[in-house]
Amino acid sequence: MSDLKLNLIAGEWISGESEIENRNPSDLSDLVGTFAQASADQLDATLDQARVAQVEWAAYGLERKQAVLNAIGNEMMQRAEELGTLLSREEGKPLAEGKGEVFRAGQFFTYYAAECLRQLGENADSVRDGVEIDVRREPIGTVAIISPWNFPTATASWKIAPALCYGNAVVWKPANVTPASAVALAEIINRQDIPKGLFSLVMGSGGSIGQRLVESPKINAISFTGSVPVGKGIASAAIQNLTKVQMEMGSKNALAVMDDADLDLAVSLALGGAFGGSGQKCTASSRLIVHANIHDAFVEKLVAGTQAMKVGHALEAGIQMGPVVSQQQLSENLAYVDLGKTEGAELACGGARLDMPHDGFYMSPGVFLNTNNDMRINREEMFAPLTSVIKVGSYDEALATVNDTNFGLTSGIVTQSLARATHFRRNARTGVVTVNLPTAGTDYHVPFGGRGDSSYGPREQGKNAAEFYTTVKTAYISAGTPV
Ligand code: NDP
């Protein structure tokens, strides 16, 4: 088949043992492409080649590595319009979000290009006379990267860029729902001055090729973003080989709206945080914890704002929310709407399948009212354009409710009180906390990750990435015979 998109195995683009079709969730008549599914033998072959290539790459000079990362990042930023269009077409997020994601992904590469030159070690005198100590970081080896579909380019980039920066080989298994963005990024990386087979793309389902990858003794580390059950399975596989693992897995983020909040700001933060990317973000504001004194005014504006949101084809100008990614996700979302009603929540608006000019996975953004924090809709990650309002009587109750979750990725407070903001910032049990800002949307030069079921292993991004993508060596040096 002429337009079949191939896997990158041991430095060669090759077809697989089978193929899948990828369709546009905004318009199912639009075939995005046909994608090869890698075989187990191909995976093994590329892992062998990665081991050889990694040694060669680690020996490249720092400026040579830096030039590679800069070239990747700059090309992505320059092609953000084109690649963002492809991303939105296959994932369903509005075009502005797709373009923004590709640009941001490029910034991860240019940030880590600069980090190539900032790899400083430590030194010390030994407790033994005449002996010096040199502590430095070395590459960990071959890194398996398993990425999700909701940020198909950015999530992969914030893993691939530091992996390469610190001298590792990469074997990447992207989500099978968003393979086109993966192929586009792999083409850019493979065109650079890198050893043959340093970077591999192995497309295929998580349950088959993904599982085989994480079970392989030929990998030295696994970086995963996705769901909690899959993450737990990957951790079990990793421990069999004592493979280093880092995982980021969803959340149930809360935005606390206090009675002294700027009401319009609070509503706009809630709308953006709840429905950006159709709510398919690990940082989405899925619990809105609202002080009783401002509750009614907030809810009135929130529901009006939700009903006014323009849902449509991801590439159509002026839309604020696209479809959800797949039939499976849509079915699960609608099941959560039914569950919420069964649990006694009031569905104030939305939460329904939408008939649109194009056949796609459309639903209206939904708001639940009169909910409590024990309901399953407030405890399980829905990954849907659905949010719940929980009314509370005080700041203390709000904070306790924010922290009453198994997850702990992000949380936010909307308040004009410095005292409350400071107390919240120091006592919210999440890896990321925001004040008068959305719970979603983070920078690339600082750590990202959570607590509880949200994350496992070292933080991602910023300088913290070195903790995962390197291993520390402590050298003792004696000059030999004393002078
Ligand atoms: P999964 O956890 O199933 O998938 C994430 C990645 O892991 C994909 O690349 C997937 O491959 C891969 N994978 C799946 N099973 C295995 C396995 N046994 N071994 C190795 N890799 C595997 O998430 P889903 O995409 O199915 O989404 C389900 C739910 O997960 C969402 O509704 C949401 O709640 C949560 N999620 C959270 C994300 C986050 O950002 N924290 C991101 C995505 C999902 P493939 O998809 O090709 O099968």
Image (cartoon, grey):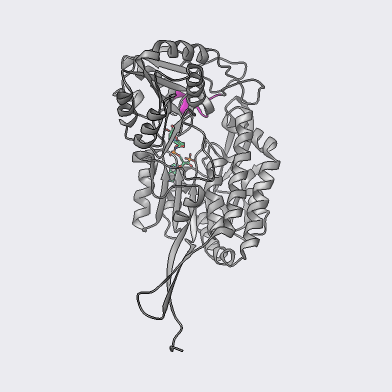
Residue at horizontal 35%, vertical 75%? 127
The foreground one among 33 and 446 is 446
For the record, the magenta segment spans: 323-332
Q: Quadrant of residue 405?
A: top left
Q: Position of residue 374 (x, y in %)?
A: 28, 24
Above or below: residue 343 compared with residue 2: above
The foreground one among 173 and 431 is 431
Residue at horizontal 52%, vertical 63%? 51
Prevailing SS of the magenta stretch: helix
Above or below: residue 241 compared with residue 102: below
Above or below: residue 311 compared with residue 249: above
Picture quarter with the N terminus: top right
Quadrant of the picture in which ligand 1 is shown: top left
Q: Position of residue 242 (x, y in %)?
A: 36, 58
Residue 276, can we see it? yes
Q: Quadrant of residue 331?
A: top left
The foreground one among 161 and 9 is 161
Residue 325 highlighted magenta (yes or no): yes
Q: Position of residue 110 (x, y in %)?
A: 62, 49
- The tally of labels here is 0
Residue 253, can we see it? no
The foreground one among 46 and 481 is 481
Q: Position of residue 281 (x, y in %)?
A: 48, 32
Residue 258 highlighted magenta (yes or no): no
Is residue 397 shown left or right of residue 114?
Answer: left
Is residue 245 shown left or right of residue 190?
Answer: left
Residue at horizontal 34%, vertical 56%? 240
Residue at horizontal 37%, vertical 58%? 241
